[in-house]
Image: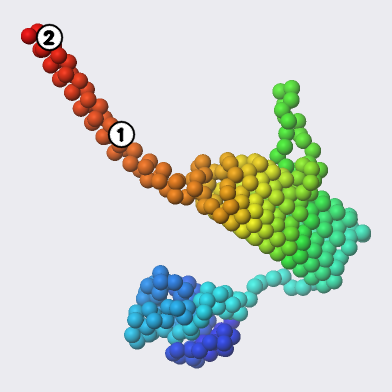
Amino acid sequence: MSTTVEWIAQELNCLVKGNQILEIHGAESVLKAGPHDITFVGDELNLKRLKSSKAGAVLLEKRLEESFEKAFEESPFTSIAVVDAQAAFIKIIQKLRPSRTLPEMGISPQAQISDDVELGENCHIYPQVIIRPGVRIGNNCRIYPGAYIGEDCIIGDDVTIHANAVFYADVKLGNRVIIHAAAVLGCDGFGYRFEAGRFIKIPHLGSVRIEDDVEIGAGTTIDRGMIGPTVVGEGSKIDNQVMIAHNCEIGKHNAFASQVGFAGSITTGDYVRCAGQVGVADHVHIGDQATLGARAGVHRDIPAGEVHIGTPAAPEKEQRKIVMSLRKVPEMRKQIRELENQIKTMSQQLENLSKLEANQ
């Protein structure tokens, strides 16, 4: 889609400085933008990068206007001052690059839907979808090709399930949930007893419950509880390839980056954040608004509001001191060797002195 700076300013209800009729063909980051692209600047770093940019227009955060004018006495850019540059950019990019979805088609004759399935209004079920008996689906749902919905699953309103997602039996989804491609919900947990020299499988008879406004990334797996549900709380966002084991209870508005792994029966408070590749041992509790840095290895409870990093995970300030100390170890080893040599020399000198005194 092509448009003009004037149209963008009208959409944002803001004023333009520069060429209002400049044609805009796309939206890009500061360093990748060309003469007919719009970009955004919401911090000092991108303001500095703007000096190397070829962008035609920029969405500029109002708090940076003075710095912008000092940096560019004669600005080569057409600018639009906004309160929140990133939010404005997101709004405009959605206009310039509308999301691509399959055309609405109602219920495909190539979908396999059991006779007793309850379907809400305005649902679109695409080819090769399989929906098993006892399933209930709300209004305005889209289930894309190849998805499998097992027995007695319940799906709320305005839910999107992308291609090849798999729901085992008894999975429950709230409203406005998004499940991305190849996610698996409700498989058995990794539970075994070791008896008489072999592993004996423990039955997992619980379920999975996903609350309203949750988004689950591609290839993520969420196991069913052994008894009772595994829960993902309202508003939580889970990245691709995350593993959540049986009987975990995730609080509201959590955010987990890719390759986070939760062992069984972990509980989290609200607004918890986990960076990539965090690993958490079973039965740990992570408090409200706690943050775990990338690759943190967590083996004990994390208090509310704290930031922990490293393996084993420790409070950020403490862990940084440990890391800085470790960097000094080679020099400390060298110093210790030198001290040992000095002590050895001094000991030999004292021994020789003692022998001299004894002979006198």
Helix or strand or loop: what does disc 1 sit on?
Answer: helix
**Alpha carbon separation for disc pair 1 and 2:** 37 Å
Q: Which mark is residue 260?
A: none
34 over 158 or under it: above or below: below
Is 22 on the left-hand or right-hand side of 234?
left
Residue in view at x 76 percent, y 54 percent: 209
Quarter of the image where one finds residue 123: bottom right
**Residue closest to the eye, 326 or 136:** 326
Q: Is residue 76 above or below residue 148?
A: below
User: Which kind of residue does numbered mark 1 sit on?
Assistant: Arg
Q: Which mark is residue 358?
A: 2
User: Callout 1: 10 Å neighbours few (<14), some, many (20+)?
Assistant: few
Nearer the observer, 1 or 57: 57
Label 1 belongs to which residue?
A: 333
SS state under label 2: helix
Residue at 61%, 51% in the rendered image? 287
Position in image of residue 258 (x %, y %): 58, 54
Q: Amino acid at mark 2?
A: Ala
Quarter the C terminus occupies: top left
Q: Position of residue 122 (x, y in %)?
A: 82, 72
Q: Nearer the viewer, residue 263 or 217?
A: 263
Residue 158 in which image quadrant: bottom right
